Image (cartoon, rainbow, N blue to C red):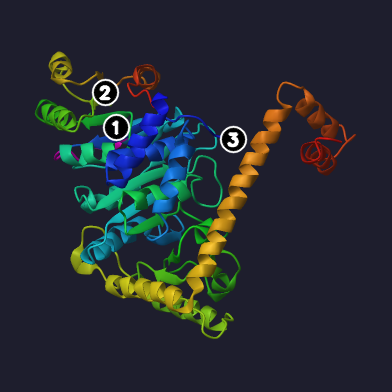
Amino acid sequence: MVRNKKIKVLLSKVGLDGHDRGVKVIASLLKEAGMEVIYLGMYQTEQNIVKAAIDEDVDVIGVSYLSGEHLVFTPKIVEEMKKNDLDDVLLIAGGTFPPEDIPAMEKMGIDKVFRAGSLTEPIADYIKNNIKKGKE
Amino acid sequence: MKRKIDIDQMVERLLSGDRRAAARLITMVEDEAKGHREVMKRIYPHTGECSILGITGSGGAGKSTLTDHLIREFRKQGKMVGVAVVDPSSPFSGGALLGDRIRLQSHFLDDGVFIRSLASRGYLGGLSKAVYDVIRIMEAMGADIVIVETLGTGQDEIDVIHVCHTCLLVLTPGMGDDIQAMKAGIMEIADIIVLNKADLDGAERSLRHLRGALAMACTEEGTWVPKVIPTVSVANKPGKIQGLSELASAIAEHEQYLKDSGAIDKVNFERVEQELGLIFKDELQKLIFKGLKGTGKKRKYIKSIIDRKNDPYSVVEEVLNVYLNPGK
C-alpha cells in the first residue's frame, strides 16, 4: 500500500519563456523520486504561482528560467511569497544563467539554485533534506 | 492538549472560509495524518448541501479543458466552485505528475474557485481515497458546487458514480462504434454524455452511435434518460467554444430531476453506503494486520497458503473467528 507523507512540489515557468524541456525533465525525475509534482505550465505570474502553492499546500516551489529573466522575476516571487506568509515553503530555481548571478539570486531569497546540467539525485536529495514544513 | 486547540482552530478557520486551512486539511487527509479524523468528524454536520459533479472519460478526451469552461458557467451563476482533479500515482515510485492545472489557468486568481490536484496514491477506480473528505472540506469552506474530475479512465473505473450527484462522461469522435457504446461499465454510469471535440471528423457518426445505443437501453418510466451533448471546448479560443451553455443547462436539469423525483435520496443513501463499506474494509484490514503484527502468525499463514497446506478462505475464516468470538 502506498502511504505516508508525500513531498509536494510545484514547478513552473514565469514570464515570456517558452522553453519547457528542462522543467519537464525535472518534473519527471522528481516523480521518479516519489514526489507529487504539480506542473503549472508556462507564462505564469508570481501571483499565479503563489496562489497555486497555497491551494495545493506544497512543500517546494521550483522555478525554471531559460530566458534571462531570473533577476527580474526572483524578487517578485520572493515578495509575493512573503506577502502570503509562505515562509515554510522551499524556493528553488533552475535553468540557464551566468554562474556569477547565483549569489545574487540566493541573496534575493532563493534557497537553492541548480544550473542546467545539475544531476538529478542531488536535487531530489536537497529537497528531501531541506523541507521546512513540519507537517502535522 | 495542544493538538486539541489546533483542531478547534482548524475547524473554525475552515468554516470561516479560510482556504489555507482547507489546503492544509486536505493534505492531512491525504497523508492520513494524526488528527484528521477528529477534524472531519467536526466538519461533517456542516456538509451535505452542495452539488457534486463528476467528470470522467479517457485521458486526452478534454476533461480538464471542459472543467475549465464549466467553472466559468458556474461562476456566472454566482456559485463558489471547488475542483478536485485526480491524476495517477506511479505504482513504482509512488510519485505523480499532476498536470491538470495547466488547463485550469483562467481561474487561478479567482477567489471563488478552489482547485486541488490529488494523486490517486494506489487507489483504484479512478479517484483518490481522500476524495469524499476533500469534497466535504471544500463545501465546509464555502463551495456551492464541487467538481470531481477523475484520472483518465478506460472501461471500468466507475467509482465516481458513488461520489457525485451528476456524472458526466466525456468522449471524443472515433472512439468506437455503437457496440462499444452498448457495453457495460463506464458507458452505463453517465447522466450526461459529452461528445467533446465535436468539430472533428466522424463526430456526426459518433453522435448517431451514442444516441442509438442509448435508445436501446432500458430506462424505467419517469427516470432520467441520459443526454448526449456535443461540445467543442478549445483552450484559450473563446470564439470556437460550442455547446457549453447547453451542457450547463443539462446539468441544471439533472439536478432539478434529482430533487423533483426524490432520486437524490437514493443517490445519497448509496453514497454513504459505499463510503461506509470502504472505511470498514480499510479499517478491518488494518485492525487484523495490526493484531497479527509481531506474532509471526501472518508470515506463517502466508507460508501455509503458498505450501498449499492452507487456503486464503480458511485463513480468513480462522482469523475472523478469533476476532468475532474472542471468548471462544
> Separation of disc 1 and disc 2 at Cα?
8 Å
**Residue A72 visible at all:** yes
Q: Which residue lies under the disc numbered 3?
A: A1
The boundaries of the magenta stretch are A15-23
For the residue marked with disc 1, what is the amino acid?
A: Gly
- Mark 1 lies on a secondary structure that is helix
Residue B203 falls in which quadrant of the image?
Answer: bottom left
> Separation of disc 3 and disc 2 at Cα?
36 Å
The quadrant of the rendering that contains the N terminus of chain A is: top right
**Residue A29 visible at all:** no
Disc 1 crowd rating (10 Å Cα; few below 14, some 14-19, many 20+) is some
Circle 2 marks a residue in which chain? A
Q: Which residue lies under the disc numbered 2?
A: A116
Mark closer to the observer (3, 2): 3
Evaluate whether label 3 is on the same chain as label 2.
Answer: yes
The quadrant of the rendering that contains the C terminus of chain A is: top left
